[in-house]
Image (cartoon, rainbow, N blue to C red):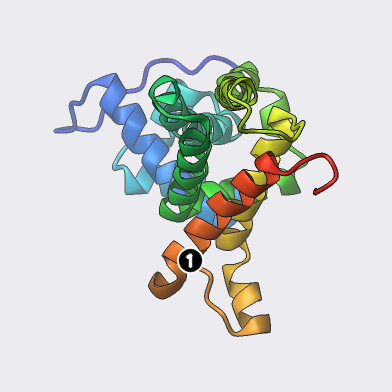
């Protein structure tokens, strides 16, 4: 796509660029999460932000780049929360429990994130593969887990030989399934995984499962 010249702002709609882009990303997140990549319409995003399609293309380059920017922001948010975890001042067991709970809370509070990831999987991660930003975002997350695991092994608390990426998979799978499969699981088994009455049960269940896996001896897993 050729470069789009700076757009003319709608009358009475003078805003700074950062705020405009944030509002576009907010609307785009909702549109892509609900309609999918193929079904989402840039015209609808423009209408919801009271801006123009031309302005969206000026800032993001097109629909594909806009979807990529939405994914980048969604992943950046959870990675930011993970990096804020005060690993150094928590014992390893408390730290890994807190990380599991953080992921649990984030996924529950951001169902659009779950939908976006599901949509990107339908497209075989084509947008993610083309984004150098997304590949860099995941490294700090694994580093946090690695530091916790190293501290736990040094203290003799974590006896299992566990890979940081495997542990990330274990935590993410539980949290993702609980939100993504809420309706199908509820229909099949008559249990709402997001119900307020069972929230703490599943939150504690996840943390207990992770700790039990890390503290099991080689022959106990």
Q: Give coordinates of residue 88: x percent, y percent.
A: 43, 20
* Residue 40 visible (yes or no): no
Q: Is residue 158 above or below residue 38?
A: above
Is residue 108 in view? yes
21 shown above or below 211: above
Q: Residue furthest front?
A: 156
Position in image of residue 17 (x %, y %): 29, 20
Q: Which sits in the foreground, 214 or 203?
A: 214
Of residues 115 and 102, the one nearer the viewer is: 102
Exactly how many numbered labels are in the figure? 1
**Residue nearer the viewer, 203 or 88:** 88
Q: Residue furthest right?
A: 219
- In the rendered structure, the answer to whether residue 24 lies left or right of residue 211 reads left
The image quadrant that residue 1 belongs to is top right
Is 77 placed left or right of 41 in the picture?
left
Q: Sort mark 1 into few (<14), some (14-19) or many (20+) by Cα contacts within 10 Å.
A: few
Q: Is residue 137 left or right of 44 when viewed as pictured?
A: right
On the rendered structure, is 11 left or right of 160?
Answer: left
Q: Secondary structure at mark 1?
A: helix
Residue positioned 54% across, 50% down in the render: 207
Residue furthest left in the image: 12
Q: Residue at x 35, y 22 (%)?
A: 7
Looking at the image, which residue is at 52% across and 63% down?
202
Q: Please give the name of the residue rendered at 55% of the width and 35% of the height, measured from the top-left corner.
A: 71
Residue under pointer 1: 201
Q: Quadrant of residue 9?
A: top left
Q: Could you tell me residue 145's position as x and y percent?
A: 59, 27
Percent x, y for residue 125? 73, 36
């Amino acid at each position: 796509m050729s470069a789009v010249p700076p757009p003319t702002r709608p009358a009475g709609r003078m805003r700074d660029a950062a705020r405009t882009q944030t509002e576009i990303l907010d609307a785009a997140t909702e549109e892509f999460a609900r309609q999918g990549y193929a079904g989402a319409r840039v015209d609808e995003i423009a209408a919801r932000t009271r801006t123009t399609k031309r302005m969206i293309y000026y800032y993001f380059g097109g629909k594909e780049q806009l979807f990529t920017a939405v994914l980048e922001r969604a992943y950046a948010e959870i990675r930011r929360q993970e990096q804020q975890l005060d690993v150094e001042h928590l014992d390893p067991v408390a730290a890994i429990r807190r990380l599991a709970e953080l992921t649990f809370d984030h996924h529950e509070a951001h169902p659009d994130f779950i939908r976006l990831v599901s949509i990107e999987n339908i497209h075989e991660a084509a947008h993610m593969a083309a984004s150098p930003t997304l590949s860099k975002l995941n490294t700090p997350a694994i580093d946090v887990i690695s530091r916790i695991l190293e501290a736990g092994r040094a203290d003799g608390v974590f006896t299992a030989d566990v890979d940081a990426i495997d542990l990330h998979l274990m935590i993410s799978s539980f949290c993702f399934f609980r939100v993504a499969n809420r309706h199908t699981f509820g229909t099949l088994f008559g249990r709402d995984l997001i119900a307020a009455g069972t929230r703490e049960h599943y939150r504690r269940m996840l943390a207990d499962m992770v700790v039990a896996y890390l503290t099991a001896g080689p022959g106990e897993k």
